[in-house]
Every structure is written in structure tokens, then in C-alpha cells.
């Protein structure tokens, strides 16, 4: 099983690698056209705000709910997916209205209109991530791994047409729709080729609104930390958001491509093993996976530490950044290194807790981490402290997370074994 997981993880990693490189190209275009300043901050903010809603409602919550539920009731696949889709759509509409009102209090004019327009991209993303989660359950990873590449390619075209806020907002919607159609095209190879039928009605309730909202709070909060950082950095000195975002793009390359994809592939197998009460086998699989991940993560972190300046210079060579800008970005990149080391472990521990359906633990953990993150970022803004310490605060929370999640997982595992 470990060999198969590694194979699927490599397939997913290659697709995500292409997506991340397209993301770099996107950032380079922004840097080349706009440099580092207020306008580049606004463009990056337009990409970050939809990520906030996507991260909260969709990115993590969908797979965290769907995959364990499908593992328990495989014969009810279509009923589960359609019930989940309808309820998530309603919650998303309400969330869209609330966030639009909040944005109105902080932004105005063309920027406000562009932000709420770009936020509409969350609706096609619902269908993208539900399809993606079902395909993960079916162990189909190739096509969905290229979703980010499709999305970024359309965004790049929008930026090349002109770094105008309205153009970009429309481009974000088109990009999200394109990604949705791309991922859904792989359903023709799955067990169920047509999984969406919103007119379908079923008396059985698999996922109540209370559980769904609970899960969004429990899981979604963990995924919005990068968006929170970007929003707070937009209130710091001009150019801070751009510099922070460029450094973040670099450290997220190994994190998202190599270090956390394994957890995505592991999740479907772990959920099945735990649903069938093979707790020891699931635990052994996790331990082997964490050890392998930690070794790779440390090697990546060491390379990034010693060659951070060279890495930044090579990636942004065409952006004509000053030496001071290069130094700032590489300094922030070093501040993110503990995240690089522990990202994969945190992701795997979180997936295991979801497989055990320990939603209370995850919710309390998420709320604690997000409150701490907001407090730390708020202090940085109030006291006008260097953006570098925002990376340090993220790294600190990564270490805290692995301690809390690790302790919670081992407590859960020992209880399950003692019950058998």
C-alpha cells in the first residue's frame, strides 16, 4: 500500500509542480509589470480574498467530509454528493453576502467592486473541489492535479491583456470555471459519470447543516492562514504584501508539490482502513509516512537555508528587483523554513484525525490557532513591526500545531486500540 501511495503522490506532485511553476510565472508577470508597491498589493489582494472564502468553505472541508462519508456508505455515493452540494451552495451564498458587507467597510470604489466580482469564483470552485474529492476517493489523481495549471494559465492571459482590476476579476471567474470543466471532464472515467443532480431529493440525511458548518469551522480555519497573513500585510507599509507574497510562493512550491501531496493520497487509504477498523495498519502507515516526509522536508529546508538568496534571484531574475528587495524576500523565505519542515506532518496528522472523525478536537485546535494567528498579525500591524516576523509567527504556529495534532492523534489511537 505504501508503494501505491508513493506512486499516486508522485503523479499528483508532477501535476502540482506544473501548477506551481505557472504560479511563479504569474507572480513574475505581476512583479515585472507592477514592481513592488500599492498597485501590485491590490492585484495580489484580489487573488487572496477569493482564496480566503475558498479555503474556509471548500478547499479542506469538502474532502474532509466527503471521503470518510463515502468510505462508510459507498452505495449512497450520489445521494451523499448531491445533498452535500446543495447545502454547501446555500452556506456559500450566505458567506458571500457577509464577506461582501465586510469588504465594503474596508475598501471602496473600483477595488471593492473588483473584489466582490472576483469572489463569485467561489461558486464554480464548489463543483471543482467536490468533483476532485470524489476522484480522490476513486484514486484518480492525474487530471485534477493539473487544475492549478489550468487556473493560472487563464489568469496569466488576463494579466498579459492588462493589469486592470476589472479584467483580472473577470479572469478569475473564467479561470475558476475553466478549472471546474477540466476536473469534471475526468468523471467520465469514474464509477459515476454524472454526480451532480441538484433537483434530486432524498429523505435520508447523511450530512446535517450543523455538522457541515461545524466541519467548515473545524477544517476550513486551518486553510485560511495564508489569506489572513496577506490581508494583514496589506495594512502594513506599501509593498509589504507583494514582498511577503513573493516569498510565500517560493516556500509553498516544495510544501504543496512534494510535502503535503502525500497526505492527500494517504487520506483515502487511511479513511478506508479506519472505517474497517484496521487501526494498527493505519497507524503503521502513518508512522512510515511521517518519517519519510520529515527526511525529505529537512533536506529541502537545508537547501533553502543555504541558497535562499540565489533561489530568489533566479526565480525573479526578470523582475528587475533591487538588491534590497531580493534580500528582503530571501530573509522572509528563511523565516518560513520551520513551516517547510512540519507542513507534511501537520497535514497527515490532520487527515488522520478526520479519518477518526474527531471533529471536536479539530474545531478547538483550528479556533485556537486562528485566534493566535490574528492576534500575532494584529500586533505586527499595530506596532509597525517588520513583515519578516509575520513569517516567523507562521513558523511558530506550525511548531505549535504539530505538538497539538500529534498529541491528539496518539491519544485517539491509544483509545481506539484499548476499545478493541
Image (cartoon, rainbow, N blue to C red):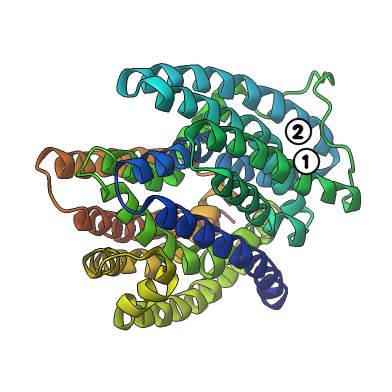
Sequence-earlier tag: 1 or 2: 1
Numbered disc in front, either 1 or 2: 2
Checking the image for residue 148, the label placed there is none
Frontmost residue, 60 versus 285: 60
Residue 180 visible in this rendered orientation of the protein: yes
Q: Is residue 150 above or below residue 102?
A: below
Local crowd size for mark 1, using a 10 Å CA cut-off: few (<14), some (14–19), many (≥20): few
Q: Is residue 134 above or below residue 118?
A: below
Residue, x 77% and y 42% (percent of image)? 181
Pinpoint residue 254: horizontal percent, then vertical percent: 48, 69
Alpha carbons under labels 1 and 2: distance apart? 9 Å
Residue, x 36% and y 20% (percent of image)? 108
- The part of the image, by quadrant, that contains residue 312 is bottom left
If the image is split into quadrants, where does the N terminus sit?
bottom right
Q: Answer left or right for 239 relative to 349.
A: left
Residue, x 70% and y 23% (percent of image)? 86
Frontmost residue, 414 versus 43: 43
Residue 69 visible in this rendered orientation of the protein: no
Q: Tell whether label 2 touches label 1 (CB within 8 Å).
A: yes
Frontmost residue, 256 versus 309: 309
Q: Which secondary structure lies at badge 1?
A: loop
Pinpoint residue 178: horizontal percent, then vertical percent: 72, 43
Q: Is residue 74 above or below residue 205?
A: below
Q: Is residue 269 above or below residue 11?
A: above
Pinpoint residue 110: horizontal percent, then vertical percent: 43, 24
Q: Which secondary structure lies at badge 2?
A: helix
Local crowd size for mark 2, using a 10 Å CA cut-off: few (<14), some (14–19), many (≥20): many
Pinpoint residue 293: horizontal percent, then vertical percent: 49, 74
Residue, x 69% and y 30% (percent of image)? 84
- The part of the image, by quadrant, that contains residue 252 is bottom left
Q: Which residue is mark 1?
A: 73
Q: Which residue is mark 2?
A: 80
Amino acid at each position: 500500500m505504501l508503494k501505491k501511495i508513493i506512486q499516486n503522490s508522485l503523479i499528483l506532485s508532477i501535476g502540482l509542480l506544473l501548477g506551481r511553476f505557472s504560479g511563479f510565472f504569474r507572480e513574475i508577470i505581476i512583479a515585472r509589470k507592477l514592481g513592488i508597491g500599492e498597485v501590485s498589493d491590490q492585484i495580489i489582494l484580489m487573488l487572496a480574498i477569493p482564496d480566503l472564502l475558498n479555503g474556509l468553505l471548500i478547499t479542506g472541508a469538502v474532502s474532509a467530509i466527503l471521503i470518510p462519508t463515502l468510505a462508510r456508505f459507498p452505495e449512497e455515493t450520489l445521494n451523499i454528493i448531491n445533498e452535500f452540494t446543495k447545502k454547501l451552495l446555500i452556506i456559500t451564498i450566505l458567506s458571500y453576502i457577509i464577506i461582501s458587507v465586510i469588504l465594503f467597510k474596508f475598501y471602496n470604489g473600483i477595488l471593492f467592486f473588483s473584489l466582490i466580482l472576483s469572489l463569485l469564483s467561489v461558486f464554480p470552485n464548489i463543483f471543482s473541489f467536490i468533483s476532485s474529492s470524489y476522484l480522490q476517493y476513486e484514486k484518480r489523481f492525474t487530471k485534477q492535479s493539473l487544475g492549478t495549471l489550468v487556473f493560472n494559465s487563464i489568469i496569466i492571459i488576463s494579466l498579459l491583456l492588462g493589469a486592470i482590476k476589472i479584467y483580472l476579476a473577470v479572469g478569475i471567474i473564467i479561470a475558476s470555471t475553466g478549472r471546474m470543466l477540466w476536473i469534471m471532464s475526468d468523471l467520465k472515467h469514474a464509477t459515476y459519470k454524472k454526480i451532480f443532480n441538484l433537483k434530486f431529493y432524498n429523505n435520508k440525511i447523511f450530512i446535517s447543516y450543523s455538522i457541515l458548518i461545524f466541519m467548515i469551522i473545524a477544517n476550513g480555519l486551518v486553510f485560511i492562514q495564508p489569506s489572513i497573513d496577506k490581508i494583514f500585510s496589506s495594512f502594513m507599509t506599501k509593498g509589504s504584501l507583494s514582498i511577503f507574497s513573493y516569498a510565500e510562493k517560493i516556500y509553498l512550491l516544495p510544501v504543496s508539490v512534494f510535502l503535503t501531496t502525500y497526505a492527500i493520497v494517504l487520506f483515502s487509504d487511511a479513511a478506508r482502513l479506519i472505517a474497517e477498523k484496521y487501526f494498527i495498519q493505519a497507524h503503521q502507515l502513518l508512522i512510515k509516512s511521517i518519517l519519510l516526509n520529515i527526511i525529505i522536508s529537512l533536506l529541502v529546508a537545508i537547501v533553502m537555508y543555504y541558497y535562499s538568496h540565489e533561489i530568489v534571484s533566479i526565480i525573479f531574475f526578470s523582475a528587475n528587483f533591487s538588491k534590497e528587495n531580493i534580500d528582503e524576500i530571501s530573509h522572509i523565505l528563511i523565516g518560513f523554513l520551520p513551516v517547510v519542515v512540519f507542513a507534511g506532518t501537520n497535514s497527515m496528522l490532520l487527515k488522520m484525525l478526520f479519518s477518526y472523525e474527531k471533529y471536536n478536537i479539530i474545531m478547538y485546535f483550528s479556533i485556537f490557532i486562528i485566534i493566535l494567528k490574528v492576534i500575532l498579525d494584529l500586533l505586527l500591524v499595530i506596532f509597525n513591526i517588520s513583515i519578516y516576523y509575520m513569517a516567523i509567527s507562521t513558523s511558530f504556529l506550525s511548531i505549535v500545531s504539530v505538538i497539538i495534532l500529534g498529541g491528539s492523534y496518539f491519544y485517539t489511537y491509544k483509545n481506539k486500540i484499548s476499545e478493541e
